Image: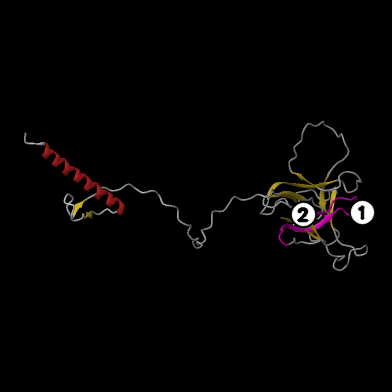
Amino acid sequence: SRWTCGSLMAILAKITIFVVCTSLAALEQTRNDAHMPTKRHTDANNTNCQASEWILGRDGRDGRDGLPGVAGRDGEKGDQGMPGPPGPVTVAGGTVYTRWGRSVCPTNAIALYDGFVAGPLYSQSGGGADFLCLPRQPLYSYYIPGVQGDSPIQGAEYEFFGASPLAYNFDHNVPCAKCYVATRSVSYMQPGRNDCPKGWTKEYEGYLMTERKTHFRNSIICVDKAGESIYNSAPSTNGATLYMLEATCTHGLPCPPYHREKELTCAVCTK
């Protein structure tokens, strides 16, 4: 046989040397964490791994993740952003007031209804103690025909003695309007002044009016300075009546600043 035991042993020895040299080169490349070919040198007495032999090893496995680094410093403050879109309109609940002497509401208010100023007959001691703003169209519930009670209510008309800022309405009936303001929640009538405190809105201004001093008492209301009369109302019905108020200086009010011959003003204010 061509292959003797000795020749087979020699071949096996060469293969073993080759495998060992290759493994050493791969180990060296892994340690150096390099991706370039590694030149492996052997000492002069090693004749099985030739000097200056180049062997390309395989890439090693990925290493483990390192520890987290320390936190960096805060960055500089950025520029202010653009304004956002407007939010929803907040409704405060609203407030309701009566505009005496007019059948319309100011432009910033919603008219709930308009109608007629009414009250008890000026010469009667009973009945209600205030003026009402009755709607133009009443709505009745179940009723029995006939007069079951004796508490009538009358239309109110303007009455004056001599000159008056509203003299053009003399002896005619008084209109009114019930007004609603959605963006404000409080209303009040300011007597003696035709303006409102700072931060309040003036809905309208006018004059203080009520029954005459010799009549039975009724409430005091603020009639618009541009008061109107109900169109085509009958003159001098003499039901409930409205007269201008003036101060008197003989019973405690200081004069000045009050004045006996000046009609007292008023304003309706909201906030």
Between the C-alphas of marks 1 and 2, the distance is 28 Å
Q: Position of residue 114 (x, y in %)?
A: 72, 47
> In the picture provided, is 241 more to the left or to the right than 182?
right
Q: Is residue 33 above or below residue 141?
A: below
As drawn, which residue projects farthest toward the right? 250
Residue type at mark 1: give it: Thr
Q: Nearer the viewer, residue 225 or 106?
A: 106
Determine which of the numbered discs, if any, sits on residue 214 in the image. Answer: 1
Q: Tell me the quarter of the image containing the C terminus.
A: bottom right
Residue 214 lies in the magenta stretch = yes
Q: Position of residue 80 (x, y in %)?
A: 52, 61
> In the picture provided, is 217 more to the left or to the right than 114?
right
Determine which of the numbered discs, if any, sits on residue 134 in the image. Answer: none
Give the residues drawn in magenta, as a range.
198-222
What element does badge 2 sit on? strand
Q: Position of residue 68 (x, y in %)?
A: 45, 53
Q: Position of residue 128 (x, y in %)?
A: 86, 45
Determine which of the numbered discs, if any, sits on residue 188 in the image. Answer: 2
Task: Judge the density around disc 1: few (<14), some (14-19), many (≥20) Cα neighbours within 10 Å.
Answer: few
The answer to whether one can see residue 209 in this image is yes
Residue type at mark 2: give it: Tyr
> In the picture provided, is 45 more to the left or to the right than 142?
left
Q: Tell me the quarter of the image containing the N terminus.
A: top left
Query: Which picture quadrant has residue 201?
Result: bottom right
As drawn, which residue projects farthest toward the left? 2
